[in-house]
Image (cartoon, rainbow, N blue to C red):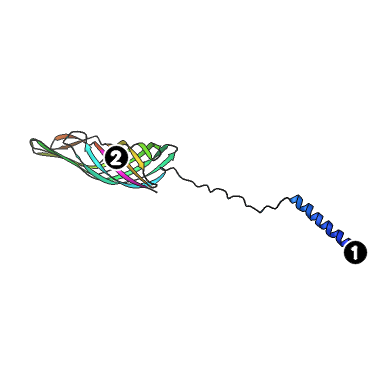
């Protein structure tokens, strides 16, 4: 019986000693701590890149003489920009209803000009400085222009009406004042050249070039 007790006690001692050695090998207990989650990579596109649509209004006048057409206009525009670093390039199209008209009367003639509407399709290229964009623009210009000259002596009417095509060139400054909103100020020269109108064997030359200044508001998608 003593032999059995000694055997049991020896086995227990060996087990305790083995457990202590195993615990010493593992070191002190440390609770499991999962690795931190990987940071979410969010992509923020450049502030000028994307499609936009907007409205504008302004004033236009002819540079030929003080008595030529002038007046207000208003309409809308749509476009798209790409941005590579500080460089921004894209295209824009606009359509304007116009009240640009003029009348010049002398003792020998009565001349009238009326621009009912005009439109441009242009490329744009510029340099961005944060929320500010300075750009140049140029492209195609189209306008519905009516010209009429009534001569007193002899009593002859010279007139021409129709859609004229030319070019548009200019530049502007645009400001991104909110995440999806920009405001701009722009100058455009619309070059339609001279229009020769005739009637009753007489001819008259009228200059159709127009200067425009406008302010606009865009929403970027």
**Tag of residue 4:** 1
The magenta-colored residue range is 212-221
**Does the stretch in magenta take in 81?**
no
Foreground pick, 59 / 167? 59
Q: Main secondary structure of the magenta part?
A: strand
x, y percentage for residue 114? 19, 42
Q: Pick the quarter of the image with the N terminus.
A: bottom right
Q: Tell me where residue 129 sits by quadrant.
A: top left
Is residue 163 toward the left or the right of residue 175 in the image? left
Q: Residues within 10 Å of mark 2 (few under 14, many from 20)?
A: many
Q: Tell me where residue 8 sits by quadrant.
A: bottom right
Residue that carries the numbered disc 2 in the rendered image: 141
Of circles 1 and 2, the one toward us is 1
Residue 58 visible = yes
Residue 113 visible = no
Label 2 secondary element: strand
Is residue 33 toward the left or the right of residue 174 in the image? right
Q: Residues within 10 Å of mark 1 (few under 14, many from 20)?
A: few
| Real-space Cα separation, disc 1 to disc 2, in angstroms | 113 Å
> Do the residues under discs 1 and 2 have CB atoms within 8 angstroms?
no
Foreground pick, 201 / 124? 124
Is residue 164 toward the left or the right of residue 88 in the image? left
x, y percentage for residue 59? 24, 41
């Amino acid at each position: 019986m003593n032999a059995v007790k000694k055997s049991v006690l020896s086995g227990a001692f060996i087990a305790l000693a083995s457990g202590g050695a195993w615990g010493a090998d593992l070191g002190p207990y440390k609770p499991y701590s999962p690795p931190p989650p990987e940071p979410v990579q969010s992509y923020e596109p450049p502030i000028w890149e994307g499609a936009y649509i907007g409205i504008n209004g302004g004033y236009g006048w002819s540079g030929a003489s003080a008595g030529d057409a002038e007046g207000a206009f208003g309409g809308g525009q749509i476009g798209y920009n790409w941005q590579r670093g500080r460089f921004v390039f894209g295209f824009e199209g606009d359509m304007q209803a116009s009240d640009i008209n003029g009348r010049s009367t002398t003792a020998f003639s009565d001349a009238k000009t009326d621009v009912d509407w005009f439109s441009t399709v242009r490329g744009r290229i510029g340099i961005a400085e944060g929320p500010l964009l300075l750009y140049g623009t140029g492209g195609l210009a189209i306008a519905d222009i009516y010209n009429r000259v009534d001569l007193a002596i002899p009593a002859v009417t010279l007139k021409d009406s129709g859609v004229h095509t030319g070019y548009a060139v200019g530049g502007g400054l645009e400001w991104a004042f909110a995440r999806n909103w920009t405001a701009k100020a722009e100058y455009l020269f619309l070059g339609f050249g001279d229009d020769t109108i005739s009637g009753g064997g007489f001819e008259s030359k009228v200059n159709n070039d127009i200067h425009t200044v406008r302010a606009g508001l865009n929403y970027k998608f």
